[in-house]
Amino acid sequence: MNRKQFICRGAAALFAMGLGTGAMAQPWPAKPITMIIPFPPGGTLDVVGRLLAQKLGQQLGQTVIVDNRPGGAGTIGASAVSHAAGDGYTLLFSASTFTTTPMTQKTAVYDVVKDFAPVALVAKAPLAIAVNKSLPFNDVKGLLEYARANPGKLTFAIGSTGSAGHLSTELLRRVGKMEYLIVPYKGSAPAYQDLIGGSIDAFIDPILGSASFAKAGQLKVLAITSKARVPGQPQMPTVAETVPGYEFYSWYGLWGPASLPKEIATRLNAEVNKALATDMREKLEPQGLLLTPGSIDDFARFQKDDMAMSQRIITEGNIRAE
């Protein structure tokens, strides 16, 4: 065997070995990661998701591409992730509506528990009760008194059926012993437009949504729905200060397909926790968000408990998407 034949055969042997082991030996991530957000750009979910994607990309040394896939109340984007390969290159970043949509839609295209692997709870978003500025009250006590004295007169907008805002509105009606009319909208933007214009009296939505309107004096924010006052908005009272026990959040999490390997999920969870310790906290907490580092098991337990609570509200309120 001459020198040229020896080199060629040696190269062929190494190539054959690589075919058998290369895919496993290649460290993750070896290429860009796609983070699907199943709602349009611009909302609170998108703001948090893009900031997280930027931080993860810096930490992992690979670009994390944000892919907004709106439609079907978030089901289109979620379904795409449920059918993706479990290789860690396609992830879902979504809000708590991801877990409640199958409870309100008979034709749900995914199962939260069976089709997805929880990775990390990223943040909880207390909601704010915003009302038209012309209403004759400025706090939750006044809201309760007015609603009880005028049963059925107040109108509350909801941005979408089964959303956190919808469920918190139903919960407030129940625990506050009030009666008011719920008016559905296709998204928060038209709801705020009518709230400011006076066609609707009130709207419960994440703090970030109403903050700019309140600052401009276009509406009044009565209280927030967290158990305690939040660091970023210490002046804002909670509903619980008037209605003991009332607590509700929208929340944001990261998932992969059910087949996501545990080692990749664990790595991602650690990287998310690392990201939450950066200036993400400085950027998001002043806007009323509560960052929530924790383990995969912590997230799984939280999701299970939150889904049970949401299912009770949906069942008792007979909430169904049209």
Image (cartoon, helix red, strand yellow):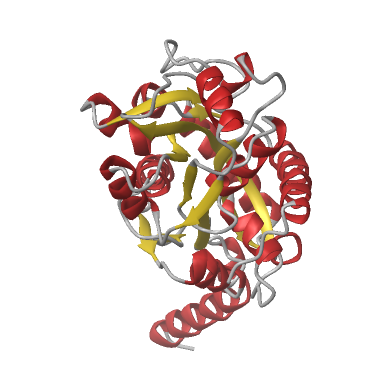
* Residue beneath the point at 56% across and 28% down: 225
Q: Residue furthest left?
A: 216
Query: What count of labels does the image hold?
Result: 0
Q: Residue furthest front?
A: 149
Question: Quick one: quadrant of the C terminus?
Answer: bottom right
Q: Position of residue 269 (x, y in %)?
A: 60, 41
Rendered position, 228 above or below 256: above
Rendered position, 177 above or below 231: below
**Could you say which is closer to the camera, residue 218 or residue 189?**
218
Query: In which quadrant of the rendered view does residue 267 lie?
Result: top right
Rendered position, 214 above or below 78: above
* Residue beneath the point at 50% across and 15% down: 237
Residue 48 is left or right of residue 173, and the answer is left
Q: Position of residue 224 (x, y in %)?
A: 51, 25
**Could you say which is closer to the camera, residue 218 or residue 75?**
218
* Residue beneath the point at 44% across and 11% down: 234
Q: Position of residue 122 (x, y in %)?
A: 54, 38
Rendered position, 297 above or below 77: above
Q: Position of residue 20 (x, y in %)?
A: 63, 76
Residue 269 is left or right of residue 288, and the answer is right
Query: In which quadrant of the rendered view does residue 220 lie?
Result: top left
**Could you say which is closer to the camera, residue 270 or residue 95?**
95
**Could you say which is closer to the camera, residue 307 or residue 89?**
307
Residue 293 visible somewhere in the drawing: no
Residue 95 is left or right of residue 113, and the answer is left
* Residue beneath the point at 41% across and 40% down: 201
Residue 294 visible somewhere in the drawing: yes
